[in-house]
Image: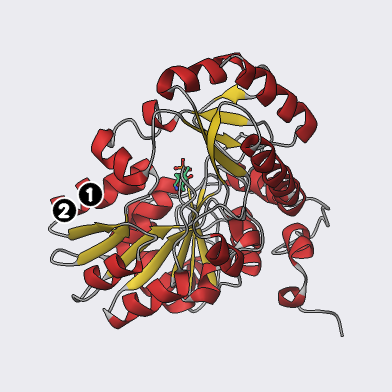
Amino acid sequence: MSQSPKSYRPATKLVQGGVQRTHHGETAEALFLTSGYVYDSADQAEATFNGTVDHYQYSRFANPTLSMFEQRLCLIEGAEECRTTATGMAAVNAALLSHLKAGDRVVASRALFGSCHWIVSTLLPKFGITSVFVDGHDLAQWKAALSEPTNLVLLETPSNPMLDIVDLPAVAEMAHAAGAIVVVDNVFATPLLQQPLKMGADVVVYSCTKHIDGQGRVLGGAILSNRKWVNDVLQPFIRNTGPAMSAFNAWVLLKGIETLALRVNAGCRAAADIADFLAEQKGVTRVWYPMRDDHPQAALARKQMSAGGTVVTFEVAGGKDGAFKVMNAFGLIAVSNNLGDSKSLATHPATTTHMRIGADERAKLGITEGVIRISIGLEDPEDLKDDLAQALATLG
Ligand SMILES: *Cc1c(COP(=O)(O)O)cnc(C)c1O
């Protein structure tokens, strides 16, 4: 008997998972660039709509190229169901708005991606939903916030850009006791390094724009959970509000994800090496990397992740002037606000991605003016180190 796709190892799932060949027997996944579908008869259309026959209806609801990608993500994540969306933010928004209603309460870690923070702090309260932020690494704050009935917990671990770690099993247990579902934004870890569903999370969301595409081409989002929640809560929201991913983007992502393990494993090795290298450099005052011994939660990171990820954060002397001097001196490393690309990208969070949250909130998150975040790409790490060394030398 042949193996079940569920028993394949991750690298195999990334390449073979979810493939549905047409009668043409194509090797690569087919791109179904179609908005609608035709029926054999009016009877088949009726049977499709009343649910007695399984047939594609409209690409706002489902599309065969998207189905292949969603099936592949399910296999990697160990989830029952997946729905994909046009962007990562559409995924976060759909997961939250489909589940919540006026009068509900949300507890979130403070260190969220900027737009996720905006949804929780600004959008949800507009609809009568209370939101509370906690420092994600502080279990006492979670305990206090979850001592009241709560409907949803949203968190990111490791967080952007300071790579804070949240204790997933501990927070999930407190959240469930308070009546909340736990939604984890798993972008920084990727499904290869950390599987939140196995540690008590109920829903996992991704920006596929990052490592899943991994080559800086398309936007995309994904939501993974159990069958009941997806069918009863999420699917009606997606079907009727229309955040659907385009079939073309799903096809690009199907090809991108084939190399996810190769890229993420190489990126993690290079990032760990570069974090150690940076810690030795003059002008660097601090380095953050989840698996380094000097990370305040290194033990927790090792417990819930299999590697530290592809992002390294460090602080240079001289505040904003120092950081700008170093970034403007980079030759190979590009200045960008993106991450998870095959090209190495450097960000100054205080003046870009985390500008809008304001100085007080930045101080709470530890984002100083000298902090630089680097997303490590697929260049030779020695060339990246050469670039970092020559740029840091400009600090004098
Ligand atoms: C990029 C990102 C998002 C948003 O995804 P988009 O695809 O840009 O909409 C959400 N969360 C995290 C952690 C991200 O890095």
The reply to whether residue 60 is visible in this rendering is: yes
Task: Check disc 1 and report its element: helix, strand or loop.
Answer: helix
Q: Badges 1 and 2: C-beta atoms under 8 Å apart?
A: yes
Q: Vertical placement of 395 versus 138: above or below?
A: above
Q: Vertical placement of 254 versus 393: above or below?
A: below
* Quarter occupied by the N terminus: bottom right
* Quarter occupied by the C terminus: top right
Label 2 belongs to which residue?
A: 125
Residue 248 position within the rendered picture, expressed as x and y whole percent measured from the top left: 61, 42
Residue 81 position within the rendered picture, expressed as x and y whole percent measured from the top left: 53, 70
Q: Please report the residue visible at 45 percent of the width from the left and 22 percent of the height from the top.
A: 318
The yes-or-no answer for disc 2 within 8 Å of ligand 1 is no
Within 10 Å of disc 1 (Cα), the crowding (few <14, some 14-19, many 20+) is some
Q: Amino acid at mark 2?
A: Pro
Q: Please report the residue visible at 38 percent of the width from the left and 26 percent of the height from the top.
A: 351
The reply to whether residue 99 is visible in this rendering is: no
Q: Vertical placement of 48 versus 298: above or below?
A: below
Q: Vertical placement of 55 versus 253: above or below?
A: below
Quadrant assignment, res 341: top right
Q: Which one is closest to the eye, mark 1 or mark 2?
A: 1
Residue 205 position within the rendered picture, expressed as x and y whole percent measured from the top left: 47, 58
Label number found at residue 208: none
Label 1 belongs to which residue?
A: 121
Q: Amino acid at mark 1?
A: Ser
Farthest-out residue, right: 1
How far apart marks 1 and 2 lie (CA) works out to 7 Å
Quadrant assignment, res 349: top left
Q: Please report the residue visible at 51 percent of the width from the left and 72 percent of the height from the top.
A: 197
Q: Depth check: 34 or 9 in front?
A: 9
Task: Check disc 2 and report its element: helix, strand or loop.
Answer: helix
Q: In this image, 56 relative to 274: left or right?
A: left
Q: Please report the residue visible at 64 percent of the width from the left and 30 percent of the height from the top.
A: 281
